[in-house]
């Protein structure tokens, strides 16, 4: 069984300001619209000139390129990518409809069920507004995590180095380091985030990831998240809300990307981790149980207290050139498992496990030219 895309596009008659290359994506056979497909316009050198997403009607729009030879690349999570035949754009050609039927082989993804059915708790109007917002910042999100054109980044990284218990609460000292890297965040690939979520265990250490530009711009993000518009009291700011689609059992993220409508780019992203309890139960609780059982013969464990509202992060975006942005500052609040205990002579002890947020942060100090 295959999924087919039917593409309708109008070639340019002449390059004019505001002209668009319009198209429509439909499911082969049924003619149902394909929502959330990622369309890229590339030149013969595979340089991406423009990007867009298909909306609830399967429609998309791209800026009209100059006369030349191009191709359209279409990607949708769970299916192999497809590249169109050569698309000739001429200075003087009559507008005409071009239809392409392209079979696409499905790709099975772990922990991800691909379905054409919309399961998001939003109205068609809300989805249309959300996709318009997403499409407006997609070109920025696609490049915000990369700084190859500007060299490397000098950053200040702050992380907890020693945790101790004082005054009835857990505290930690901070370790500040200066590093030079080529990305503003250390993160897993978008494909890994789709399949395995935003938390992982690496060499017995837990790692929690952030939804950076690569993650937000990937087709897999749309396939696993619902989008919605979020109103703001500031007229110059509008929010793009996101949350995992029902059925996601891995650690995921929900939050709001605040967009500056005057600057035309992202301003700040606030997010929280979701479905943290299964991860804590599987990867953190066994070590805590083993520790207490090695010290006490009889011990009883209560359910771990988890406040997901304390777990998440903040990303702050900044324009560094006319068409380039980066993540200037960030903070990530990842969960750490601790416990309180009560013991009496001759009776079983009781352990109350709980999570508390441990803060990792960073700031870009300077751009280092290549």
Image (tube, grey):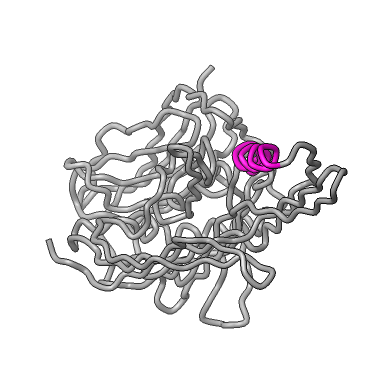
Q: Quadrant of residue 34?
A: top right
Residue at screen point 66% across, 58% down: 125
For the question of whether residue 129 can be seen, the reply is: no
Residue at screen point 52% across, 60% down: 132
Q: In the image shown, does 359 or 217 lie closer to the viewer?
A: 359
Q: Magenta span: helix, strand or loop, mainly?
A: helix
Quarter the C terminus occupies: bottom left
The magenta stretch is 278-295
Q: Is residue 316 above or below residue 39?
A: below
The answer to whether residue 169 is magenta is no
Q: In the current view of this chain or complex, which residue is farthest to the left?
A: 370
| Percent of width and height locating residue 305 | 74, 53
Q: In the image shown, does 278 or 110 lie closer to the viewer?
A: 278
Q: In the image shown, does 144 or 26 lie closer to the viewer?
A: 144
Residue at screen point 47% across, 29% down: 79
Q: In the current view of this chain or complex, which residue is farthest to the front?
A: 345
Residue at screen point 23% across, 46% down: 89
| Percent of width and height locating residue 22 | 41, 50
Q: Quadrant of residue 255?
A: bottom right
| Percent of width and height locating residue 220 | 49, 41
Q: Is residue 117 above or below residue 307?
A: above
Horizontally, is 119 left or right of 346 in the view? left
For the question of whether residue 146 can be seen, the reply is: yes
Q: Is residue 162 above or below residue 260?
A: above
Q: Is residue 319 above or below residue 338?
A: below
Q: In the image shown, does 364 or 220 lie closer to the viewer?
A: 364
Q: In the current view of this chain or complex, which residue is farthest to the top?
A: 1
């Amino acid at each position: 069984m295959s999924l087919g895309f039917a593409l309708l596009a109008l070639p340019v008659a002449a390059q004019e300001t505001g002209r668009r290359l319009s198209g429509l994506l439909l499911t082969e056979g049924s003619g149902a619209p394909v929502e959330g497909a990622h369309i890229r316009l590339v030149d013969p050198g595979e340089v991406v000139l423009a990007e867009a997403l298909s909306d609830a009607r399967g429609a998309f729009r791209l800026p009209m390129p100059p006369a030349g030879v191009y191709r359209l690349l279409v990607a949708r999570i769970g299916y192999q990518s497809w590249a169109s035949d050569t698309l000739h754009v001429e200075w003087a050609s009559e507008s005409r409809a071009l239809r392409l039927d392209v079979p696409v082989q499905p790709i099975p993804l772990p922990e991800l069920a691909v379905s054409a059915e919309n399961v998001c708790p939003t109205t068609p109007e809300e989805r249309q507004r959300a996709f318009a917002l997403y499409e407006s910042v997609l070109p920025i999100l696609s490049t915000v995590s990369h700084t190859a054109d500007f060299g490397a980044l000098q950053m200040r990284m702050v992380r907890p180095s020693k945790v101790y218990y004082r005054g009835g609460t857990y505290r930690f000292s901070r370790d500040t380091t200066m590093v030079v890297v080529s990305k503003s965040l250390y993160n897993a690939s978008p494909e890994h985030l789709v399949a395995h979520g935003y938390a992982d265990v690496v060499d017995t250490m837990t790692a929690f990831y952030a939804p950076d530009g690569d993650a937000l711009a990937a087709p897999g993000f749309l396939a696993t998240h619902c989008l919605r518009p979020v109103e703001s009291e500031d007229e110059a700011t509008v929010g793009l809300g996101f949350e995992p689609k029902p059925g996601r059992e891995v650690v995921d993220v929900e939050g709001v990307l605040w967009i500056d409508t005057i600057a035309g780019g992202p301003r700040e992203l606030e997010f929280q981790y979701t479905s943290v309890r299964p991860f804590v139960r599987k990867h953190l609780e066994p070590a805590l149980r083993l520790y207490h059982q090695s010290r006490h013969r009889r011990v009883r464990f209560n359910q771990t207290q988890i406040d997901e509202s304390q777990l998440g992060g903040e990303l702050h975006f900044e324009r560094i050139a006319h068409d380039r942005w980066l993540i200037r500052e960030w903070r990530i609040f990842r969960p750490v498992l601790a416990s309180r205990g009560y013991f009496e002579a001759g009776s079983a002890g009781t352990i109350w496990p709980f999570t508390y947020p441990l803060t990792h942060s960073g700031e870009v100090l300077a751009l280092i030219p290549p």
